[in-house]
Amino acid sequence: MNYSTYFENAKKATRDLIILSKEKVNAVLSDLAEALVNNTASILLENEKDLAKMPIEDPKYDRLKLTATRIVDIANDVRNVGNLISPLNEVLSEKILENGLDLKKIRVPLGVVGVIYEARPNVTADVFSLCFKTGNVAVLKGGSDAEFSNLAITKVIHGVLAAHNINLDVLTLLPAERAATEALLKARGFVDVLIPRGSQSLITYVREHSKIPVIETGAGIVHTYFDESGDLEKGKAIIFNAKTRRVSVCNSLDCVLIHEQRLGDLAELLSPLADGKVELFADERSFNILESSYPSNLLNLAQTEHFGIEFLSLKLAVKIVENLDEALDHIAVHSSKHSEAIISENAEHITRFLNNVDAAAVYANASTGFTDGAQFGLGAEIGISTQKLHARGPMGLEELTSYKWVVRGDGQVRK
């Protein structure tokens, strides 16, 4: 198949999109939110076809699964994006030079945004809404696991665009076949930036093979350190929430580090996890402590490979550390720079942790489950960037813009 037509049409559509009024953009997103809910039955029917192809024990199953409630949540995110103030044409700085030239630095769209993603049908609506709000054309390449779901959501989006007489090429969903991925990776000159969302293997592959700039939305290898002064009740609630709220997402907790002076509280600290059927991989000292209290069928002696892994399931590593310094050292080695947390009542330790840990989001006495565009007030997110160039953390409207210099003169020439 020749994919060049997809990319050429997407590039041309940027000129149609940039002239839309803010009122038109907001009206489309409002109508889309309503249309998604109205088409719940047909979307769920297609989602069932995808679910039937995937084993329920697959960590991606929960991300793939849609429900009526989840579709309402997706619609609400679309509506929230519509209600946000557009960053386009914001004047970032301005000045008049001695020669009279008037310089303004203003926000503009990135252009054509390509997104490669796995079994996450919500991404289809999220990416479209954020790109559309910021004047960007979206070229999406979903995985075969979510093929029917992505097609169903795209059909709804295209229906709303058609009703508003807007070029349907502002959203392109490429075929689910692998060849489309290879074509997108090479679409230099047509796609301005590429954002992979999915497993570490997907992200690594895109980074190593893309011919166009990549913003990495990395895997989440997430730690929570329970300090010597940590509050036990806060710790129990935070750790349980961070691990069990939704295990298949990138902000889910993967490793608990506990100060050795709090070993007497270890069993109680982790006791709620047993009710949640969380399987532990504990280092030798914590294993010996937990052996008498934690269910034996859920307790394992940790191996080296259990530290520095994104489980995406009801599994959790546990390690005892001598002090804050050892916790910081462990996180520095094993973190994916996504989200990291400390539970402590020591203000000095909290400050050291927040300043020292190199991650997109760092927390004190709160669940890492909050690392999310909607939770951060961004309406939705196009991904959570774990790199440092251009964007970091949940990427919303501002992160989908660049800037240009607008220069107004009255006949000036340079000597």
Image (cartoon, grey):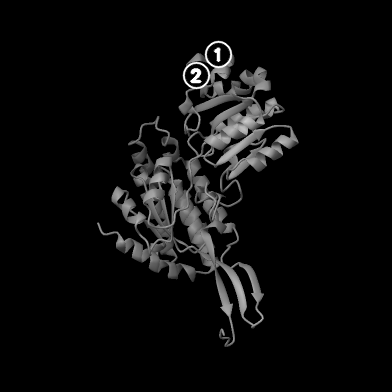
Answer yes or no: is residue 267 visible: yes
Foreground of the two, 280 or 85: 280
Foreground of the two, 75 or 342: 342
Task: Pick the quarter of the image with the C terminus.
Answer: bottom right
Check the image and report above or below for 176 versus 286.
below
Q: Is residue 306 left or right of residue 45?
A: right
Earlier along the polypeptide chain: callout 1 or callout 2? Answer: 1
Answer yes or no: is residue 118 visible: no
Residue type at mark 2? Leu
**Label placed on residue 301:** 2
Q: Residue at x 63, y 23 (%)?
A: 269
Residue with the mark numbered 1: 291
Q: How many marks?
A: 2
Check the image and report above or below for 203 versus 82.
above
Q: Position of residue 149 (x, y in %)?
A: 38, 46
Q: Position of residue 253 (x, y in %)?
A: 55, 33
Check the image and report above or below for 226 versus 34.
above
Check the image and report above or below for 137 versus 364.
below
SS for callout 1: loop
Q: Position of residue 107 (x, y in %)?
A: 56, 66
Which dot, 1 or 2, sits closer to the camera?
2
**Label placed on residue 133:** none
Residue type at mark 1? Glu
Crowding at label 1, few (<14), some or many (≥20) Cα neighbours within 10 Å? some
Residue positioned most to the bottom? 411
SS for callout 2: strand
